[in-house]
């Protein structure tokens, strides 16, 4: 006969097999949490606090690279920014990447 007979294997120790198969997945999730998820949440929280603290007179940089001074902060998440003398642009608060407070060294460098 060319085909050998297959015998059933013993099915003992099912609980430990499941534990050893799930352990690597749990370890991978823990590593991803501490290396990827947690730092990203922290960065998002800091960015949200920075955006909420924007006030009139601050110098801001948008994600498009536009630098300007905040003229007016509106309630609906929009900020009016003066990018040149007499040129005012409405910008969504979420696009602000950097906020420099009044009297910062960047303004002193611009005036010089």
Image (cartoon, rainbow, N blue to C red):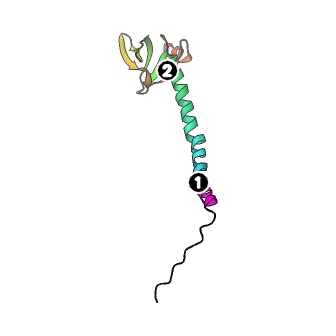
**Viewer-nearest of discs 2 and 1:** 1
The location of residue 8, given as percent across then percent down, is: 55, 74
Dividing the picture into quarters, in which one does residue 42 lie?
A: top right
Secondary element at tag 1: helix
Q: Residue at x 48, y 16 (%)?
A: 59
Answer above or below: position of 31 versus 99. below
Dividing the picture into quarters, in which one does residue 41 lie?
A: top right
The location of residue 69, given as percent across then percent down, is: 45, 14
Answer above or below: position of 12 versus 84. below
Sequence-wise, the earlier of marks 2 and 1 is 1
Q: In this view of the protein, which residue sits in the foreground, 6 or 42? A: 6
The location of residue 72, given as percent across then percent down, is: 42, 10
Residue corresponding to mark 2: 51
Q: Residue at x 58, y 41 (%)?
A: 33
Specify whether residue 76 is painted magenta.
Answer: no
The location of residue 34, given as percent across then percent down, is: 60, 40
Answer above or below: position of 17 versus 90. below
**Do residues under tags 2 and 1 come within 8 Å of each other at their CB atoms?**
no
Q: In this view of the protein, which residue sits in the foreground, 45 or 69? A: 45
Residue corresponding to mark 1: 22
Please state the extent of the stretch shown in magenta in the rendering: 1-23
Q: In this view of the protein, which residue sits in the foreground, 39 or 60? A: 39
Q: Residue at x 60, y 71 (%)?
A: 10
Q: Residue furthest bottom?
A: 1
Spatial separation of the CA atoms under disc 2 and disc 1: 41 Å
């Amino acid at each position: 006969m060319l085909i050998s007979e297959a015998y059933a294997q013993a099915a003992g120790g099912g609980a430990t097999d499941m534990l050893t198969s799930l352990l690597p997945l749990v370890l991978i999730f823990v590593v991803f949490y501490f290396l990827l998820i947690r730092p990203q949440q922290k960065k998002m929280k800091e960015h949200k606090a920075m955006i909420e603290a924007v006030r009139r007179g601050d110098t801001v940089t948008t994600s498009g690279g536009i630098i300007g001074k905040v003229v007016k902060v509106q309630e609906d998440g929009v900020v009016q920014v003066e990018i040149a003398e007499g040129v005012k642009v409405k910008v969504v608060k979420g696009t602000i990447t950097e906020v420099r407070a009044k009297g910062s060294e960047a303004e002193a460098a611009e005036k010089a």
